Amino acid sequence: MLTVALTGNPNTGKTSLFNMLTDSYEYVGNWAGVTIEKKVGTLKNKRGQLVDLPGIYSLSPLSRDEGVTTLYLLDESPSSLLNVVDASQLERNLHLTIQLLEYGRPVVVALNMIDVAEKRGLDIDVKKLSEQMGVPIMPVIARSGFGCDTLMQAAVKSSIDDESLVSPRHFDYGPVLEQAISTLEAKLPVSMASKRWLALQLLEGNIPVLQKLRQHVDPVWLQAFYVETEALVQKLPEGKKLPDYIRDKRAGIIDRWLQSAVRETKPLRTTLSERIDAIVLNKYLGIPIFLAFMYFTFKLTFDWIGTPVSDRLDALLNGVIRDGIASFLNTVGAASFLKAVILDGIVAGVGGVLVFVPQIFMLFLIISFIEDSGYMARIATVMDKLLEGVGLNGKAFIPMIIGFGCNVPGIMAARTIEQPKERLLTILLTPLMSCSARLSVYSLFVGTFFQSHQALIVLSLYVLGVVVALILAKLFSYTLAKEEESMFIVEMPPYRIPQWRTLSRSTWEKGKGFVRKAGTFIFGGSVVIWLMGYSGFHGWNVPMNESFLQAIGSVLSPVMEPLGFGNWQAGAALITGFLAKEVVVSTMGIIYAAPTEAGLEGAIAHFFTPLQAYSFMVFILLYVPCLATVGVIRNETKSAKWTWFSVGYALVIAYVISFIIYRGGLLLGFH
């Protein structure tokens, strides 16, 4: 089967094009770093596979996700390369194209966002540019699907016609470099493919290529060869280092291509994106605007749309549906044990979580809007100065924002951060971001104790998570990243009005995991938790305060007493919350189950005061990451030490801050 590798700079529309060509759905966002690992799909015409590789500016990787692309080209042999370039940013994008042409596989160029280029006054002669570059160029608009079928046919045709015939393109880099390339080529095995490309990549400082060549050439000789070549290049009139010299040579080639094939039809003027950026990137207004946007998000989620819909769903689940199930079980003569399992275990546990689905989906809709509109990169830019002061950079805030939806993809998104120690810091701190699973706990408590200020209370928790992360970043950077310089490079895409199709699919892809978890993990967990509450040391059908669940919760209750929630019910919920934060609500739904119209909210009102409720929510925000998050931390850090550290420090921080809030609140007269 043919294999087409999809390559390009970040934020050129690769993932959108992948979805169009494979008729599938992958995560799409209008910001750099959306694809953090390769994805494989089958072309719609069933003629081959399409491999979506992370966006890169150069084949010499700076970050872990960029390394995926370089290692793929080193270890695999794709039938052809489909290079996506932004038609409005040709000069920058074509640097990667030249490196792909030198690789030695058939290349087809997808000239994406031609509509944006036209709006900017750029007239591109596609035929002439194709002749100059010597490859097929297909104009497309990936978001709408324009030109995608023709592009797919061209990619397949290129793979079939030229798979064994294509030779690497030869661009002239001057006598000194050409001699060096020939010298290194002669050292490489005759059977090795793309020798000229490997030589150029080595001279650019490509670490994965250097590691590969060390297997065939004496590493000492390679080092001496590089030093000698760079010394010769620096003696030239340009007087530049090797990577800069190579880049300048390629810039000259690109300039000649564009001079003959591209012209400006009207003078460039200030774009709408630039006018908006003058406000949202203002050093005084940037962060307040972001906070105002988050406040608006929570007003939508709790006061205006999410909670009213959630209340209706609650009435349906715990009223009509529960009564219907109870009636059915009575009709068929179900045993009392079975009725208790279903009504007090499954319905109370799973139903207690499902009622918050509207708030969860509303939050995911807003996050999807941030990603697809182009605002995500602006948030990173606004936060860069603040993060720089604590040892990170603005790019670290992107995983944190993604963590607002779910900490797992947020931690994985840290792969886009170039510096290893900053990446580690981001991985360790992202679990402090308030994810959607915690939102179900907040919804329960703010709906009970803070009905008039729901959005403000939830915003305070999100802000608290960020503030704690910044303080800890400063503390950790003294020991973990004190010798490492920071680098902040982020693509600033134009603002776009998100397509409803993209928004709805993105929201569903994020939210369906929550629903799936409710139907599987929480379903099973609710049965187990109910059984622990139904049984005890004295047998079955014991009172809840004599159950195994009470025994487990009682172990924690004395420890939690200084924080304001020293009852066994809270302790039991916190223990089960390690599996998934939604299970906290599920556990409370079972423990506090009462045949009253007030339901769960009315029940917990007897066990918490507003101050205790806020202290409990803060503890939920900061204490140990859920099991899935711990697993991904272990996978991303490849270290048991850092994994246990992430669990331990979070527990300590949660305890200390909840203690300060509760005891401080008492001193100030709150209750």
Image (cartoon, rainbow, N blue to C red):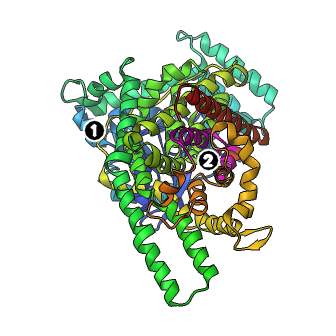
Nearer to us of marks 1 and 2 is: 1
* Quadrant of the drawing holding the N terminus: bottom right
Instruction: Specify few, some or many for label 2: CA neighbours under 10 Å numbering under 14, 14-19, or 20 or more.
Output: some
Q: Which residues are magenta?
A: 608-633
**Residue 591: image x %, image y %?**
61, 61
Q: Residue at x 56, y 46 (%)?
A: 608
Report x, y in % for residue 560: 69, 41
384 is within the stretch colored magenta = no
Q: Earlier in the sequence, mark 1 or mark 2?
A: 2
Residue 401's x, y, as percent?
A: 49, 38
**Residue 116 numbered tag:** 1
- Majority secondary structure in the magenta region: helix
Q: Which quadrant would residue 645 be assigned to in this image?
A: top right
Which amino acid lies under the numbered mark 2 shown in the image of this protein?
Tyr
Depth check, front residue: 266 or 452:
452
In the picture as drawn, the residue positioned furthest to the bottom comes out as: 332
Q: Residue at x 53, y 64 (%)?
A: 594
Q: Quadrant of residue 103?
A: top right
Q: Residue 33 bears which disc, if any?
A: none
Percent across and percent down for residue 29 are 42, 44
Magenta region includes residue 612? yes
Q: Which residue is mark 2?
A: 72
